[in-house]
Image (spheres, rainbow, N blue to C red):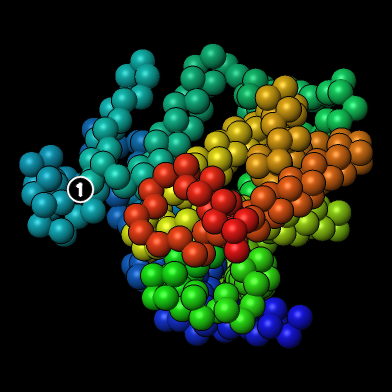
């Protein structure tokens, strides 16, 4: 057991001290703080003056005050002002940078307006102006039809519309909206974890073989103990890194001092997270990691060069990608038959069953059955992977096919 912990510590510390791991952790943690403070950063680069001036060509001379009133009502910082300049002069001003935008507005049976700015990508100001013009059009139409303000309000009053589901497993629309964001984030987290860390294991095993370090290691410790110590060490490292990301993200949004933080936690469902959902997320994260980690160690033991790792890892990557497609498509329809069936397939269950747990009120036996199937699969794959690993670490030369699994088993039996 002492040798197990030595390899465990070596796998953990070696990867934790690498520049790539440290830089990746710092960059991702910094990205959370950047995202949380993005509104403040954008505002700091904004114009500190009174606001954007909108030059308005209004031949009637009566629409600019109405336009300004509508802009103020919508709390826009745009200042509408009439201009005597021609369109040619205004366009030249935009080209030279002295004018940001202008509006040509004409009154007839209906209002017609043309908003001109330097770039068509200027969505914010253009939308504010469009909404203000539409409000003026609505007011003029109501006045022409003899409608009062109360009658106009009643005309645009939304209908009361509620959604009810017959299925016992369905949640309310409000609960689904809260769960959807949370499930999306956690599925993405699990998806990244089962790609990144098992791939790290395969690369580590292949690197030890290519440098002939493996020959020294297996002379003092069994290949099976080496495999599981490697899996446990890098898995612990992954948990630590994910905890760092989670803590950094939490404090980044909590200390940002902007309305974005409260909105983010509310929309994503983190403000009302259930303990059971969090526990299932951790459980499926661990089960998904160990399932794919054993498979990655198996594949990594077959190659002698790190360049060959990615080719043999393709089947595993396809499984993860298919699982993610099912999970992300199932966010919109978690009760679909293909989602239910795939949630009991062990290689899809870490993502898909967690999706169903987060989005639906399913019976407890369903996730427990899925967990049992995954544990059984991990046990069988661990037994089979140990046999392959025992012989695979002794194989050298070009290994670019899954057919080498049989050769590794035969070699392991002779050992």
Seen in the picture, residue 109 relative to 201 is either above or below; the reply is above
Q: Position of residue 264 (x, y in %)?
A: 63, 57
Crowding around mark 1 (Cα neighbors within 10 Å: few <14, some 14 to 19, many 20+) is some
**Where the N terminus falls, by quadrant?**
bottom right
Q: Looking at the image, is 27 positioned above or below residue 132? A: below
Q: Please give the name of the residue rendered at 72% of the width and 22% of the height, measured from the top-left corner.
A: 337
Query: The C terminus lies in which quarter of the figure?
Result: bottom right
Q: Position of residue 100 (x, y in %)?
A: 23, 53
Mark 1 element type: loop
User: Is residue 170 left or right of 389 when viewed as pictured?
Assistant: right
Rendering coords of residue 187 (x, y %): 64, 49
Q: Nearer the viewer, residue 84 or 345?
A: 345
- Where residue 269 appears, as percent x and y from the top left, is 73, 52
Is residue 253 visible from the viewing direction of this image? no
Residue at the spot 87% in from the left edge and 20% down from the top edge: 166
Please say whether residue 53 is visible from this viewpoint: yes
Between 22 and 87, which is closer to the camera in this rendering?
22
The residue at the far front in this view is: 414
Residue 328 relative to residue 113: left or right: right
Observer-nearest of 268 and 79: 268
In the depicted structure, whether residue 170 falls above or below residue 218: above
Foreground of the two, 220 or 226: 220
Residue pictured at 65% horizontal, 58% vertical: 386
Q: Which residue is mark 1?
A: 118
């Amino acid at each position: 057991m002492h040798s197990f912990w030595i390899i465990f510590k070596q796998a953990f510390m070696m990867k934790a001290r690498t520049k790539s791991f440290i830089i990746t952790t710092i960059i991702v943690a910094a990205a959370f703080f950047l995202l949380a403070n993005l509104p403040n950063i954008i505002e700091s680069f904004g114009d500190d003056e009174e606001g954007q001036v909108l030059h308005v060509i209004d031949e009637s001379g009566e629409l600019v005050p109405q336009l300004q009133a509508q802009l103020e009502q919508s709390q826009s910082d745009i200042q509408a002002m009439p201009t005597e300049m021609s369109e040619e002069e205004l366009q030249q001003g935009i080209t030279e940078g002295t004018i940001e935008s202008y509006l040509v507005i004409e009154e007839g049976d209906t209002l017609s307006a043309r908003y001109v700015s330097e770039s068509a990508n200027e969505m914010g100001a253009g939308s504010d102006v469009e909404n203000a013009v539409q409000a003026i059009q609505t007011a003029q139409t109501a006045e022409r039809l003899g409608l009062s303000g109360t009658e106009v309000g009643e005309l645009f009053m939304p209908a009361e519309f509620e959604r009810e589901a017959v299925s016992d497993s369905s949640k309310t629309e409000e609960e689904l909206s809260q769960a959807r964001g949370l499930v999306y984030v956690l599925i993405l987290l699990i998806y990244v974890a089962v790609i990144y860390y098992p791939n790290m294991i395969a690369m580590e095993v292949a690197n030890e073989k290519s440098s002939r370090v493996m020959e020294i290691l297996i002379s003092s410790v069994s290949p099976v103990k080496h495999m599981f110590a490697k899996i446990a060490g890098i898995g612990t490292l992954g948990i630590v890194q994910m905890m760092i990301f989670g803590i950094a993200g939490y404090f980044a949004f909590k200390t940002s001092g902007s309305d974005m933080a409260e909105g983010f936690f509310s929309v994503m469902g983190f403000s009302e997270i259930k303990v059971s959902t969090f526990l299932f997320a951790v459980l499926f994260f661990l089960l998904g990691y160990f399932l794919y980690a054993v498979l990655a160690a198996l594949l990594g033991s077959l190659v002698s060069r790190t360049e060959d790792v990615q080719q043999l890892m393709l089947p595993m990557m396809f499984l993860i990608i298919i699982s993610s497609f099912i999970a992300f498509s199932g966010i919109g329809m978690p009760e679909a038959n293909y989602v239910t069936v795939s949630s009991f397939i062990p290689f899809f269950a870490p993502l898909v069953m967690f999706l169903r747990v987060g989005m639906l009120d399913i019976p407890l036996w369903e996730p427990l059955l899925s967990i049992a199937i995954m544990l059984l699969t991990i046990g069988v794959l661990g037994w089979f992977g140990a046999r392959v690993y025992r012989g695979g670490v002794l194989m050298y030369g070009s290994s670019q096919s899954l057919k080498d699994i049989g050769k590794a088993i035969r070699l392991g039996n002779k050992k």
